[in-house]
Amino acid sequence: EAQVTQNPRYLITVTGKKLTVTCSQNMNHEYMSWYRQDPGLGLRQIYYSMNVEVTDKGDVPEGYKVSRKEKRNFPLILESPSPNQTSLYFCASSPLLVGELFFGEGSRLTVL
Amino acid sequence: GIQVEQSPPDLILQEGANSTLRCNFSDSVNNLQWFHQNPWGQLINLFYIPSGTKQNGRLSATTVATERYSLLYISSSQTTDSGVYFCAVPISNFGNEKLTFGTGTRLTIIP
């Protein structure tokens, strides 16, 4: 089954404790991206990647890192999480830069 | 940049009713997508529809790119149709394209 898989789905952590949200897709898509969704602010892009070892900033990259060492994986790293990073996070993949987009199930992160 | 507006912002309907959701965009686009975010937060890809009409069961979508709008039709609504519906179009930003999402239509289907 074609899918985008994120883990963990739910996480409560404390300020400053490094965490990684993993994302994997099995559709051999070139393009992957991360979004955060906050009430009243909609979906905002954090980072995106157009291929292995090619990543670029989206609209709200501050406080996040990403890497794309393999085509299928695109982890999101929060080196020192802060409460303003409490949000619902989505990973997505697409065969093209603006092709049909497929989302993971979302990861709800709470930073205390 | 391109503006993406959705209407209505909220819609409450009785189960079995039909509904039409609209997405207007301010510039020409070469594709458009519709998504459904269910009450559990999952974002489901409904349609990838650059132009014309597509149908999938009780849902159908029509995009008229020349007039800069797309419509999502839901017939015989069910409670599982509740959630927020987003449209998204690509915009160009310094040579890079990315999707811009509308603010969504919140649909509530009452049993």
Image (cartoon, rainbow, N blue to C red):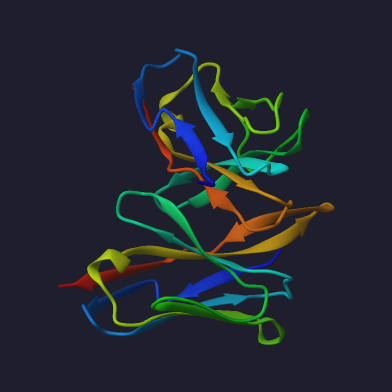
Report x, y in % for residue A53.
78, 28
State whether residue B71 appears in this view: no
- Given residues A6 and B67, the one toward you in this image is A6
- Given residues B37 and B101, the one toward you in this image is B37
Report x, y in % for residue B74.
38, 79
**Residue that protrudes farthest toward the right in the picture:** B95
Residue drawn where x is 18% and y is 72% of the image: B110
Q: Would residue A63 be found to the left or right of residue B19 on screen?
A: right
> Is A76 above or below relative to B1?
above
Q: Would residue B60 be found to the left or right of residue B1 on screen?
A: left
Indicate the quadrant containing the C terminus of chain A: top left, top right, bottom left or bottom right: top left
> Is A61 above or below relative to B11?
above
**Residue that protrudes farthest toward the top in the picture:** A17
Report x, y in % for residue A108.
38, 35
- Given residues A77 and B46, the one toward you in this image is B46
Residue drawn where x is 77% and y is 58% of the image: B92
Residue drawn where x is 68% and y is 69% of the image: B31
Residue drawn where x is 63% and y is 44% of the image: A27
State whether residue B3 appears in this view: yes
Report x, y in % for residue A89.
47, 38
